[in-house]
Image: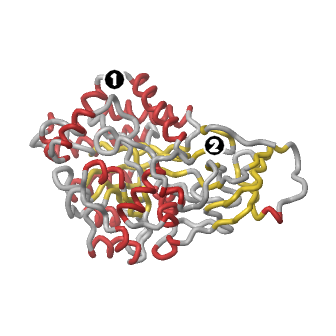
Amino acid sequence: MRTLIHSIKKLIQVEERPRQWVAGRDMASLNCIDNAYIVLNDSIIEDFGPMGQMPAAIEGPVERIDASGRMVMPAFCDSHTHLVYAGSREVEYIDKIRGLSYEEIAKRGGGILNSAKLLAQTSEDELYEQALARTYEIMGRGTGAVEIKSGYGLDLENELKMLRVIRRLQQTSPLTIKATFLPAHALPAEFKGRQTDYVDLIINEMIPVVAAEGLADYLDVFCDRGFFTVEDTERMLMAGMKHGLRPKIHANELDFSGGVQVGVKYNALSVDHLEFIGPDEISALSGSETMPTVLPGAAFFLGMRETPVRQMIEAGLPIALASDYNPGSSPSGDMRFVISLACIKYRMLPEEAINATTINSAYAMGISDTHGSICRGKVANLIITKPLPSVEFIPYAYTSNIVDTLLLNGRAAAGERLIRN
């Protein structure tokens, strides 16, 4: 069945020809149509344009949605989350308030190791129910596609448990979901002083099993000071690539780690965090197929230094933004708040931030050919906003929920209401 959304105040992020990403100065440009319509054919965008060019008749039964005063834009693509986790870590939040750093909390057995302990004590069914609730939470805020990482298992049994929960979410949620295997998120306590042995375990046992079961699209490594070295990372990435898992990297959150350069060397789909970026990292990323992905929520929550986004854009790089939704360093999956943080803290223009949370973040999770913009033939994952005065209002009203209705695969999935006539 076809759906006609008409009288749209502004149709945002439209493309006649699909692009992989938007980079440099082009990020400040956001193609829009005022007083527009869009036609969906089941789950696919079929046509769009100004109201003056809307077809007088549309073949077959048609559901009509009046979007007067409202804007329509692509649903957010969140390319970096850890939303499958057990419980919460608000006690560490108090430690942060008292002045302890992320690394100090980790050295005391908190952080990722704390989440790993909780996850081991939680059944797969309970883990699934907790994660499912979070998927509906982020849909209510406009997310239509999400990458979910493992990384709180830290042994084969519990990493598989996480990845199987992600697969269940793929099967039961209307979200588009990509799965990333992150066994090298932290060093398990029992491997203290034996990091090479744990890397060997990942390479020789974990990666082959995960790949054989088809549980992951990508392999991620936390390559940073106090976690895994460039040498460790290279070994794991090569092993993953042999099993068909394209690399992604947690890099340069805590220091200049070499993580960006090793990610580019092995054609990582994205390198994420990037609080520590200089000329060498920018040079490595220039001309590569690796998307630099910034996580403003984590830097905000942890009080960390901010990625030099303006310098990166001026150098011609693309930028993706993601939420890093996780229990320890970014307990929020609200991508509209990520846009606000990007504008307020990183001096990104609203147009740049919207590009970074749609087409560029779609690329960072490997789906920009089907998601991230309004283009004929792409998947109809769309936000119908509440009545808004302008595009600039999206980051300006930083705690307001702008979502009236979220359409996933052309069907209403979340929101308050649909206006029909």
Mark 1 is surrounded, within 10 Å at the Cα level, by few (under 14), some (14 to 19) or many (20 or more) other residues, namely some
Which residue is painted at 26% across and 49% down in the image? Answer: 302
Which residue is painted at 54% across and 41% down in the image? Answer: 139
Q: Amino acid at mark 2?
A: Thr
Q: How is the image coloured?
A: secondary structure
User: Does 225 appear above or below 192?
Assistant: below
Q: Nearer the viewer, residue 381 or 333?
A: 333
Badge number at residue 122: 1
Q: Is residue 76 left or right of residue 207?
A: right
Task: Check contact, mark 1 vs mark 2: CB within 8 A.
Answer: no
Residue 369 in the image: x percent, y percent?
59, 59
* Gap between marks 1 and 2 measured at Cα: 34 Å
Which residue is painted at 78% across and 50% down in the image? Answer: 4
Badge number at residue 198: none
**Secondary structure category for the residue under label 2:** strand
Badge number at residue 405: 2
Q: Is residue 18 left or right of residue 223?
A: right
Residue 123 in the image: x percent, y percent?
37, 22
Q: Would residue 78 be visible to someone looking at this image?
A: yes
Residue 72 in the image: x percent, y percent?
65, 54
**Secondary structure category for the residue under label 1:** loop
Q: Would residue 268 be visible to someone looking at this image?
A: no
Q: Amino acid at mark 1?
A: Thr
How many numbered marks appear? 2
